[in-house]
Amino acid sequence: MKAIWNGTVIAESDDTLVIENNHYFPPESVKKEFFEESKTHSTCPWKGVASYYNLSVKGQVNKDAAWYYPEVSELAKGIKGRIAFWKGVKIEP
């Protein structure tokens, strides 16, 4: 699977996990040069507290377009540290 934003592949992996229709990519599969930590956090009742990344590609920024769970509940242990996308990021085979 590939995560694409602003015409650029920002993550690619054969090992994504799909939960609630979101592909969670392993952290080593993302191209870190396009990611910057955000101060945004949100809480999922069954997964835990999510942290976010802003994406920066070709001079454009997509705020909070990627998220991950640095710590997770027992129910979500498979996605700990994995990264998922929204806000216009296309996920393609």
Image (spheres, helix red, strand yellow):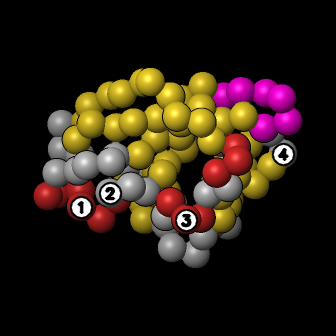
Disc 3 designates what residue?
28
Q: Position of residue 86 (x, y in %)?
A: 56, 38
Q: Point out the stretch of residues depicted in magenta.
A: 57-62
**Circle 3 crowding by C-alpha within 10 Å: few under 14, some 14–19, many from 20:** few
Q: CA distance from mark 4 to mark 2?
A: 28 Å
Q: Magenta span has 10?
A: no
Q: Amino acid at mark 4?
A: Gly
Q: CA distance from mark 3 to mark 1?
A: 17 Å
Which label number is shown at residue 80? 2
Q: Amino acid at mark 1?
A: Lys
In the rendered image, which quarter is residue 76 located in?
bottom left
Could you tell me what secondary structure mostly forms the magenta stretch?
Answer: strand
Q: Position of residue 56 (x, y in %)?
A: 72, 34
Q: Position of residue 62 (x, y in %)?
A: 66, 28
Q: Residue at x 50, y 28 (%)?
A: 38
Image: 54 above or below 22? above
**Circle 1 crowding by C-alpha within 10 Å: few under 14, some 14–19, many from 20:** few
Q: Position of residue 43 (x, y in %)?
A: 26, 31
Which label number is shown at residue 77? 1
The residue at the far left in this view is 74
Disc 4 designates what residue?
7
Q: Residue at x 46, y 35 (%)?
A: 52
